[in-house]
Image (tube, rainbow, N blue to C red):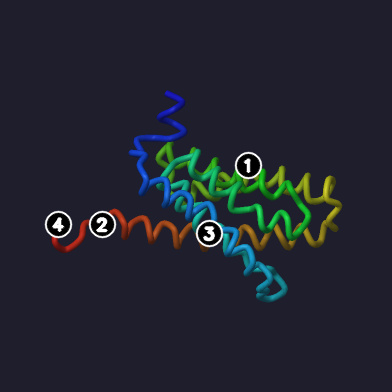
Amino acid sequence: MYKRLLIGNTSWNMRTATILLIMAVLPNLLGALEYVTVLGYRVHFFQGPVFLAAAMYGPLGGGLAGAAGSVYTAASLGNPYIVVGNLLLGGLTGLFLRFRLPLVAAVLLAYLVQLPFLWATDVYLVGMPVAVVQKVVIALLVTNIIWALVAQLLISRMRRPSPSER
């Protein structure tokens, strides 16, 4: 039962493993773009591949993409807790999707579970000012919703049969 819950019915082969590897590495590259700001809020780009991995490969894939995809950002900010926080975000998104929640709802629920961890580690362990953490919380909420919508659009297009299959 746990294997089906964590991994699902994914047929693991070289193609599957390669796609998951790309989704685990891509957030690191997108993490370099996190220095883009809009209206004083830092824009986050890493979530798209994490949510896609969670939708395609369940909690294990989402957690792996979240954790591995956070290494660059965690190292550049000197905050190792980012890796664990994004493992939670990706893994829980995949878990909530297993319970047939829509992707955006799964992402929001995963974020709500991740939020106390994020707050506690950033404020109390890393020592970030509360005002900065409040901005991070808002920026992550907005970008999580945006990237969940983008991931949902991509997933629905991938599942649609091609014209030759109709």
Among numbered discs 1 and 4, the one appearing first in the sequence: 1
Q: Residues within 10 Å of mark 1 (few under 14, many from 20)?
A: some
Image point (74%, 48%), residue name: 80
Q: Is residue 9 left or right of residue 21?
A: left
Q: Residues within 10 Å of mark 4 (few under 14, many from 20)?
A: few
Among numbered discs 4 and 3, the one appearing first in the sequence: 3
Q: Is residue 100 left or right of residue 73?
A: left
Point out which mark residue 56 bears: none
**Separation (CA) of disc 2 from disc 3:** 24 Å
Query: Which residue was labeled with disc 4?
Result: 165
Residue nearest the observer in this picture, 148 or 81:
81
Query: Which residue was labeled with disc 3?
Result: 26
Image point (78%, 44%), residue name: 120
Residue type (three-letter) at the residue carrying disc 2: Arg
Name the front one of labels 1 and 2: 2
152, above or below 101, in the image: below
Residue nearest the observer in this picture, 139 or 55:
55
Report helix, strand or loop for mark 4.
Answer: helix
Report helix, strand or loop for mark 1.
Answer: helix
**Separation (CA) of disc 4 from disc 3:** 31 Å
Q: Is residue 100 left or right of residue 65?
A: left
Q: Residue furthest top?
A: 1
Q: Position of residue 6 (x, y in %)?
A: 47, 33
Query: Are the two marked residues, 1 and 4, in contact with CB atoms closer than 8 angstroms?
Result: no
Q: Residues within 10 Å of mark 3 (few under 14, many from 20)?
A: many
Q: Is residue 91 left or right of residue 84?
A: left
Point out which mark residue 113 bears: 1
